[in-house]
Image (tube, grey):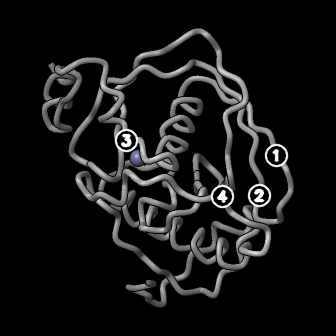
Amino acid sequence: MRQGRSRRRNLSVAAAGLKRDGLMAIREILQLGNPDLYEISTEVEEDELDLMGDIASDLEDTMLDFRERYGAGRAIAAPQIGERKRMVYMNTGEPVILLNPVITEYSPEMIEVWDDCMSFPDLLVRVKRHRSIAVTCRDLEWKERKIEADDGLAELLQHEIDHLDGVLAVMRAIDERSFVTRSERWRVKGE
Ligand SMILES: [Zn+2]
C-alpha cells in the first residue's frame, strides 16, 4: 500500500539506479512490538526488480523524512515499511540498494555500540557487533556486488540484515541494563 504521495522532488537517487517519478511516498515505519517486524523476509527475484525500485524509492523518502524529524537515520530495511522482501536502502553520503544481502565474512574482533533503530526512535540498545564484515548482494540492475565494511558501516549493515531475518537490536542487547532512552543518553553524554 502506497500512501502519502506529494509533489516534493527528491533528486538524490540517480546514483542508485532508481527511476523516480518525482513524487514522494512517505510510508509508515512499523514500530517495536509490531509482529511483522519478527518475520523472515523472502528473497528478491530478478523479475521483481521494477517493484523493488518502487519500494526502494519509498524507503528513501521514508528515511529522509525520518532524518528531517529526528536528525538520524542511515539505512532502512524493507520489512520496516511492511514489505517482507530482502532489501536494504542505505545512504551514508550516497544511496545504495542491497538486494538479498548475505554476510560472507566476519572478523572475530567485536565492538560494542549503542544501537538505534527507526522502529524504536527513542531507545538505544547496547549490542556487540563484528568489527569488520564482507557482504555480497545484488543491486537494482541485478549485478552482483561485494561490500567490505568496518566499524560504523559494519555495525549498520549487521543491524539492517538482522531486520531481514526478523531480528531487532533489542533482541541482541548485551544484558538487561543495555537500554537507555535517547534523552537520558544525551543527558549523560552532556555531563
Ligand atoms: Zn532498525
Which mark's residue is nearer the viewer, 4 or 1? 4
Q: At which x and y percent is residue 76?
A: 49, 54
Compute the Cα span from label 3 to label 4. 19 Å
Q: Does dot 3 land on a helix, a strand or a loop? A: loop
Looking at the image, tell me whether mark 3 or mark 1 is earlier in sequence order: 1
Q: At which x and y percent is residue 18?
A: 71, 72
Q: Are marks 2 and 1 in contact (CB under 8 Å)?
A: yes
Q: Residue at x 36, y 45 (%)?
A: 117
Check mark 3 vs ligand 1: CB closer than 8 Å? yes or no: yes
Q: Does dot 4 land on a helix, a strand or a loop? A: loop
Label 2 belongs to which residue?
Answer: 139
Which mark's residue is nearer the viewer, 3 or 1? 3
Label 1 belongs to which residue?
Answer: 145
Say if 178 sits above or below 98 in the image: above
Compute the Cα span from label 3 to label 1. 25 Å
Left or right of 97 on screen, residue 46 = right
Which mark's residue is nearer the viewer, 2 or 4? 4
Looking at the image, tell me whether mark 4 or mark 1 is earlier in sequence order: 4
Left or right of 87 on screen, residue 82 = left
Q: Residue at x 37, y 50 (%)?
A: 38
Q: Residue at x 20, y 38 (%)?
A: 182
* Three-letter amino acid code of the residue under disc 2: Asp
Which quadrant would residue 188 be assigned to in this image? top left
Q: Are marks 3 and 1 in contact (CB under 8 Å)?
A: no
Left or right of 166 on screen, residue 44 = right
Label 4 belongs to which residue?
Answer: 43
Q: Are marks 4 and 1 in contact (CB under 8 Å)?
A: no
Which mark's residue is nearer the viewer, 3 or 4? 4
Dot 3 surroundings within 10 Å: few (below 14), some, or many (20 or more)? many
* Three-letter amino acid code of the residue under disc 1: Arg
Q: Does dot 1 land on a helix, a strand or a loop? A: strand
